[in-house]
Amino acid sequence: MLRNSSGSSYNRMGRVIAVANQKGGVGKTTTAINLAASFAAAEVNTLLVDCDPQSNTTSGLGFLKDAGRISSYHMIMGAASAEEALQTTELEQLWLIPSHKNLIGANLELVDVSGREFRMREALAPLRDRFEFIVLDCPPALDLLTVNALVAADAVLIPMQGEYFALEGISELLDTIERIRQALNPGLGIEAVVLTMFDDRTNLAQQVKTELQNFFGEKLCATTVPRNIRLAEAPSHGKPALVYDPRSKGAESYIRLAKEIIEKQVPGVSPQPAGVELQAPAEVTQVLTKANTEEPRGDQATAVEEVPAPVEEMDKTA
């Protein structure tokens, strides 16, 4: 069981963490599943929300495809509440809101809906006092579903591989986060950056880690997640790694990652402020949904913690 340094478990308003990377194949869904499972193993009530139409998080927890089951599609479309979409899992303190391939239709169905970027935030608001962590598995693309997840989140957890191309891909994600902050969610920050599929035996991986450490500082997690066959096998059995093989290096690394994130939290984090007009400027919404390439208005920036500058400034010669 994971607890804070004083020996007592946390009991506070739920913190919403979006696990996001616009590049596929970086261990995003594996991180969402196993981090949420590790939070639950730490005896904190945790909700995992599958925001990806591919539904890999849903199947990774042993849920078969079921078009009749209430899912994140129904939740974001307002056809059902988040409470109605909750599913229990094998872990006592882990709940899931599953996804379905129909969720891809929300990108089109919500286009003309007022306040469409805030649908997930509004839907999850009633559950924030019930769960201490709400983990959102985002699609590996910048679309309206990803925008909804980032608007609903308090912070973004970025899984990255220790490879050269990972340094190139992070720039677009940081730009997206900054746009969301300026126009839709001023409180959005970076929770952490975690190296996944990490092979510490190679010079390249060590050099990339050094570059990320120099760029992100304390935001880069001390915990790294190695390539591990048990992590790869676990989804085919519909189980998190710590249930499938709790002694595997993959399971142990995610337990350490959960402990690291929990210990960084400050009790008493408040939920998103109520009574705010949830309507984004039209031109910014168009940028975020790729309707056009206009830049968000400069007068919408707010005095909040700065997101790191574009990653082009990093040394990519590693």
Image (tube, helix red, strand yellow):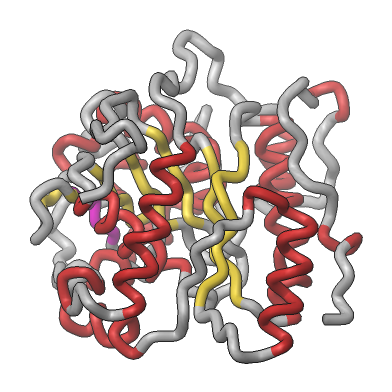
Q: Position of residue 197 (x, y in %)?
A: 51, 80
User: Is residue 233 left or right of 300 when viewed as pictured?
Assistant: left
Q: Quadrant of the C terminus?
A: bottom right
Q: Position of residue 102 (x, y in %)?
A: 32, 61
Q: Position of residue 54 (x, y in %)?
A: 37, 70
User: Is residue 159 left or right of 102 when viewed as pictured?
Assistant: right
- Which residue shows up at 37% across the image and 48% down it? 135
Q: Quadrant of residue 81?
A: top left
Which one is nearer the viewer's eye here, 288 or 50?
A: 50
Which one is nearer the viewer's eye here, 157 or 245?
A: 245
User: Is residue 202 left or right of 132 when viewed as pictured?
Assistant: right
Res. 103 in view: yes
- Which residue shows up at 63% across the image and 49% down it? 219
Which one is nearer the viewer's eye here, 134 or 288?
A: 134
Which one is nearer the viewer's eye here, 279 or 9?
A: 9
- What range of the chain is rendered magenta? 95-99
Query: How many badges with numbers are in the image?
Result: 0
Q: Is residue 188 magenta?
A: no
Q: Quadrant of residue 98?
A: bottom left
Q: Quadrant of residue 77?
A: top left
Q: Position of residue 251 (x, y in %)?
A: 30, 72
- Height in image: 205 above or below 133? below
- Height in image: 30 above or below 288? below
- Which residue shows up at 73% across the image and 63% down it? 212
- Height in image: 160 above or below 306? below
- Which residue shows up at 42% across the image and 32% down it? 121
Residue at the far front: name it. Answer: 6
Res. 112 in view: no
**Magenta part, dominant SS:** strand
